[in-house]
Amino acid sequence: MAAAAVGGGRGLWGRLGESRIGRWWRALLQDYAAAAREAASDARRRPAAAAASMAGLAGAAACVAAVPSAESFEAATVEAADALLLLSPATRSPGADRHVQRLLRRRDAGRLRYRHLLFAAVVYEAPHADDTALYPARCRYLRPRWRDLPARLLDVGFWGRWWVLGARLRDCDVNEEEFLGLPARLRRVDPHQLRSHRNESLFLEKFRPVALTAEEIRRAESEAAAPARGGGTGDPAGAS
């Protein structure tokens, strides 16, 4: 009876602390506190390693936060289709147009699948839509295997971008099929062969005023005066 009175005087929190679940939570918090103290002491001993670890954790958290969503892929696909429609069929890249049209057809058929893989996201093609009631679509033995994913992969999202779609649209205003008749050495133009900056600077060079030194002015005046002096002496053969 006295033990019950003492237990009742401890109150609700006291009884919870002495219970089985209370002792478990107390031991868990003590373990976390000991781990935090050990990590702090280790960081004081090796600050460079601790800074590198924190930078790695921050970078990993930023990568996870910047993974694009399924809605962003759909928006990027529609935006790419609009950008290609503004181009003439003669200048539009057939490869980029085929890729975007393939994505639009798969989206309209409900065959696009999105998976979030923590640090990145993938969009791949499914053989059937979700609401398909066909036997090949419902039988789990006929579903595609994970080893077939590389053949069905359509895009990879990382750091807020869809990289395959961006690579296909990089030169979407260049019709590469127009250059198939050229020799192999002329089908590719390296950046150092363009020299657009040098050509533009040479074009602007002709508008700059010409600055002559005193020596150049003296030489030009002497060269201009030499024919005049030679013409004044006359030619005896011509005079005769």
Image (spheres, rainbow, N blue to C red):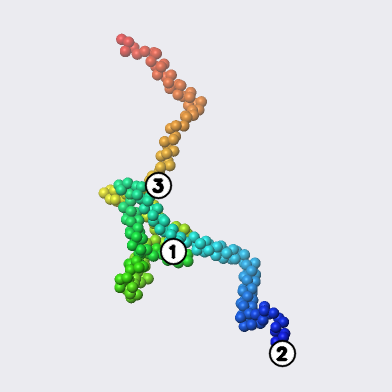
- Residues under numbered marks 1 and 3 in contact, where contact means CB atoms less than 8 Å apart: no
- Residues under numbered marks 2 and 1 in contact, where contact means CB atoms less than 8 Å apart: no
- Callout 2: 10 Å neighbours few (<14), some, many (20+)? few
Element class at badge 2: loop
Choose the circle earlier in sequence order: 2 or 3: 2
User: Which mark is in front, 2 or 3?
Assistant: 2
* Closer to us: 127 or 96: 127
Q: Quadrant of the C terminus?
A: top left
Number of numbered discs visible in the structure rendering: 3
Q: CA distance from mark 2 to mark 1?
A: 64 Å
Q: Which residue is mark 1?
A: 121
Element class at badge 1: strand
Q: Which residue is mark 3?
A: 192
Image quadrant where residue 133 sits: bottom left
Q: Amino acid at mark 3?
A: His
Q: Quadrant of the N terminus?
A: bottom right
Residue 167 shows in this picture: no
What residue is at 45 percent from the left and 21 percent from the top?
A: 222
What residue is at 72 percent from the left and 82 percent from the top?
A: 9
What residue is at 42 percent from the left and 19 percent from the top?
A: 226
Element class at badge 3: helix
Numbered badge on residue 1: 2
